[in-house]
Amino acid sequence: MCDGDAKICTLEEEIAELRRLLRDKEECLRALKIEKTLRNKFSGDLDRDEVVRYSRQLLIPEVGVDGQVALKKGKVLIIGIGGLGCPASLYLASAGVGELTLVDNDVVEISNLHRQVLHDESTVGIPKVLSACEKLKKINPNIKLIPKQLHANSETVKLLLEENQFDVVIDGSDNVATRYLLNDACVLNGVPLVSGSALQFEGQLTVYNYKGGPCYRCLFPTPPPPETVTSCGDGGVLGPVPGMIGVLQALETIKILTKSEGVVAGRLMTFDGADLTFRNIKLRPRSATCAVCGDNPTVKELIDYEQFCGSRADDKVHNISILGADEQIKPDKLDERLLIVDVRPELEYRMCHLPNSVNIPYSKIQSGKALDAIAESLNRNGQEVYVLCRRGNDSQRAIAALKPHLPGVKLINIKGGLHSYSKLVDDHFPVY
Ligand SMILES: Nc1ncnc2c1ncn2[C@@H]1O[C@H](COP(=O)(O)OP(=O)(O)OP(=O)(O)O)[C@@H](O)[C@H]1O
Ligand SMILES: [Zn+2]
C-alpha cells in the first residue's frame, strides 16, 4: 500500500516536473520567436542573417534578392567529391545553395590532399562525402547537405533522380563510363549537366543539355578506346588546375540557378595553366541523330555504361594477367642476387626505386627502340632477370615484348609491382 502510494507520488511529481519543463520550453520558444521577429523586422524575403552573410553577392544586380532566393531554393547533385567536386561544392555551399547532395564511394587518401581542398589529414581514411559535409557544415550551417556514400551507376542514379527534383547536376567524376551515365540521366530527366575535367596543366568546362544545346553524346557518340584515356593517378595533375575548373563549375551552376546570361553551353572553355590561357571553342549544335537527345532516340533509359564504354566506372588500375604462373614471383620471394629491371618512366624511377634495380622504361621497350641494346645489357647480367613496375601490369607487357628477343634469358615478373613490394616486404617504400 505504502509502496503503491510512493509510486503514485513519484508519478505525480514526474508529471509536474514534465509540465514545468514544457512551460520552460514554451517560454524559450516564445522568446526565440520574438527575437526572430525583431531580428527580421527590417527584412524582406531573406532573413537578417542571410542579408548579412550573402551581402557581397547580393549587391551584384545579376544576383540581388531574387537571385539569392533562387539559390536558396536550388537543389544540386554533385557526383565525385575529388579535385573538381571539392572546390565546386565549397563555393556552392558558401553561396547559400539550399540543398547539396554529395555522391562519392571513395575514402580520403593522403595523395588527394594536394587538390581535394575539403579534406585534410584528420579525415584520411574517412568517406569523402562525410569529410566534405563536415567541412561544408562549418562554413555554412544553414544549408541542407545530403552525403551519399555510393557508386553512381544506372540503378543508383535513376533512384536519385526519381526521388529528387535537381536543378543542376555537376560531373566531378574522373572516368568515361560515369560521364556517359550522367549525360544520359540528365537528358532523360531534363536537367543541365555542368561538366569539367582536369589533367596535368589543362582543364575543360562546358554545360551540356542546356536550353537546346548539345549533350555529351552529340559530340562523342562513341566512347574512346579505354587505353587512350589517361587518369590523374597516371598522368598527374597540378592542384590549382582542377581547383580552377571546379570553381568555374560552381560559377556556372550559380548562373543557371539565378537564370543569368552567359552560361558556357554550346561552347567548350579550355584552360591551359602552363601558359595561363583560356580559350572558347564553339561546339557543334545538338545532333538530330544523337542516340539520347536526337529526333529518334534509341537510348530511352539508362544502360550498362561500363559495358558500353568497355571500361570500369572508376579510374583505378585493374590487374592484367598475360604470363604463366612459372614466369611470376611475389615480391617477398625475391632473390637479391638477381638484377631487377624497373620499366616505369624515368620520372617515376627518380621519385623512388629499389637500390638493386636499373631503369629501362616500358615506352622504350614498346617502341622497339634500343631493343638490341636492352637485350645485350640483360644478357650480360645473367640468365634470370626480374622485371618490375608500379603495379605489375607494364612489367608483364614488357616481358611479353622482350621474350622473343631474349631466348636465352628467363624474365620473371614481380607480381603486383612496387605496390605489392611495399605491402609485403617494406612499407617504407612509398606507394603513390
Ligand atoms: N561513378 C562514380 N560514383 C561515385 N563517385 C565517383 C564515380 N566516378 C568517380 N567518382 C569519384 O570522383 C572523384 C574523382 O576525383 P579525382 O579525379 O580528383 O581523383 P581520385 O580518384 O580522388 O584520385 P586519384 O585519381 O589521384 O587516385 C573520386 O573521389 C571518385 O571516387
Ligand atoms: Zn545529344
Image (cartoon, grey):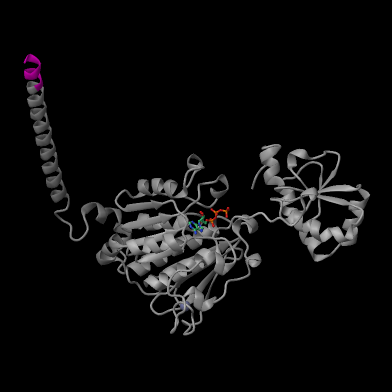
Residue most extreme to the top: 2
Q: Position of residue 214 (x, y in %)?
A: 46, 78
Q: Residue at x 66, y 65 (%)?
A: 227
Q: What is the chief secondary structure element of the magenta stretch?
A: helix
Picture quarter with the N terminus:
top left
Q: Residue at x 41, y 73 (%)?
A: 187
401 vs 225: above or below:
above
Q: Is residue 5 magenta?
A: yes
Residue 69 appears left or right of 424? left
Which of these two is toward me, 387 or 112? Answer: 387
Which of these two is toward me, 201 or 148? Answer: 148
Q: Is residue 315 magenta?
A: no
Q: Position of residue 93 (x, y in %)?
A: 36, 55
Bounds of the magenta segment: 1-7
Q: Residue at x 87, y 50 (%)?
A: 410
201 vs 417: above or below:
below
